[in-house]
Image: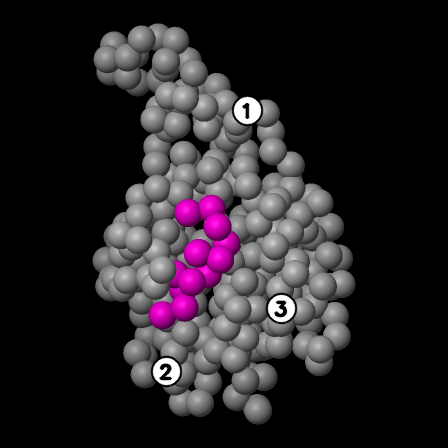
Amino acid sequence: MPARLQTCRPRWLAGAKIVVLTFLSPGCTFGPSLSEEAANLPRATYTAPGLPDSEISYIYAGDPEAPRVIYIHGTPGQATNFADYLINPARGLHAISIDRPGFGQSCPSIAVPQLAQQAAAIEPLLVERDGRWPILIGHSLGAPIAAWVAAEYADRVDGLVLVAGALDPELEKVHPMQYVGNFFFVPYLLPRSLRNANRELIPLKRELEQLALLLERVTCPIVIVHGRKDGLVPFENVAYMQEKFAGNGRRVEIIDLPEGNHFLPWNAASEIRNAIALLQDETEAR
């Protein structure tokens, strides 16, 4: 730990922070360092309906009159996790990546663990362009949020790409140290992103159980991208999604990555871009 932290706080507090970070970090979604080009991507904000004191920040690129592709990060995470997809945006699309409520430059600053509220925060971005609605890309915890959006606003979503998605409630486990990270003074020792990530993950099983009741409403085509060596979100989620999305005329494609881990937005970009192109071709052919 930096010397300044050890001198300005009691040593046992510094030690508590190390313990909590050690146990929380394996379940977190971190991205690569931010390039100057990524840091200079243009930003805008809007107010999310039904979310008090909200100001949702997002970065964007591409033709603002073109159909949209919307990127939704995991936890902790931020909009710039998908910066490379905006620096070189998918052809013919307006690319948007949001800071979810509780992360990055978005408000509120506190955690918003309810998937319904996270989905509602994305609703203002669901606009029609040239007769087409947005394609949503959700990574990790962003995947169930994207699925909730597609269920709640089924007529305003043209496709889903679920990347390393955590959707099966039976696979969600809470480590005892996560409760320590949410106890009394401990959250205030953590960076905002880790504090809010922990507060999202603890009730996630219950939230996914509620999502399960809605998945039959999803009508758009879906591409699932998942790595078999994902040590954070088990590959068994794929079978769950296949079962839940079966029927109702939905097309479900699986991109199975035998060597893939959890950090697919950064090390499986070509597969994710191919998934977007697949959905884009399908919507253009309608």
Residue under the image location 40 percent in, 43 percent down: 111
Give the CA separation, mark 2 to mark 1. Answer: 46 Å
For the residues bearing labels 2 and 1, Cβ distance under 8 angstroms: no
Residue 2, position as x, y percentages in the image: 30, 18
What is the C-alpha distance between the residues marked 2 and 3?
Answer: 21 Å
Mark 3 element type: strand
- Image coordinates of residue 198 in percent, x first then y, are 48, 36
Would residue 121 be found to the left or right of residue 271 on screen?
A: left
Q: Amino acid at mark 2?
A: Ala
Which quadrant does the C terminus fall into?
bottom right
Residue 89 vs 92, above or below: the answer is above
Is there a contact, CB below 8 Å, between mark 1 and mark 3? no
Circle 2 residue? 66
Could you tell me how far apart the alpha carbons at marks 1 and 3 are, in whole angstroms?
34 Å
> Considering the numbered disc 2 on the image, is that residue within a helix, a strand or a loop?
loop
Q: Quarter of the image holding residue 204?
A: top right
Residues under numbered marks 2 and 3 in contact, where contact means CB atoms less than 8 Å apart: no
Residue bearing the label numbered 1: 177
| Of callouts 2 and 3, the N-terminal one | 2
Q: Residue at x 35, y 56 (%)?
A: 51
Name the residue rendered at 76%, 63% in the picture. Answer: 243
From this viewpoint, is residue 218 visible? yes
**Residue denoted by label 3:** 223
- Estimate the x, y position of residue 159 in percent, counting from the top left: 55, 74
> Which amino acid type corresponds to the residue marked 1 in the rendered image?
Met
Among the two numbered marks 2 and 1 on one chain, the one whose residue lies closer to the N terminus: 2
Region rendered in magenta:
112-124
**Mark toward the start of the polypeptide (1 vs 3):** 1
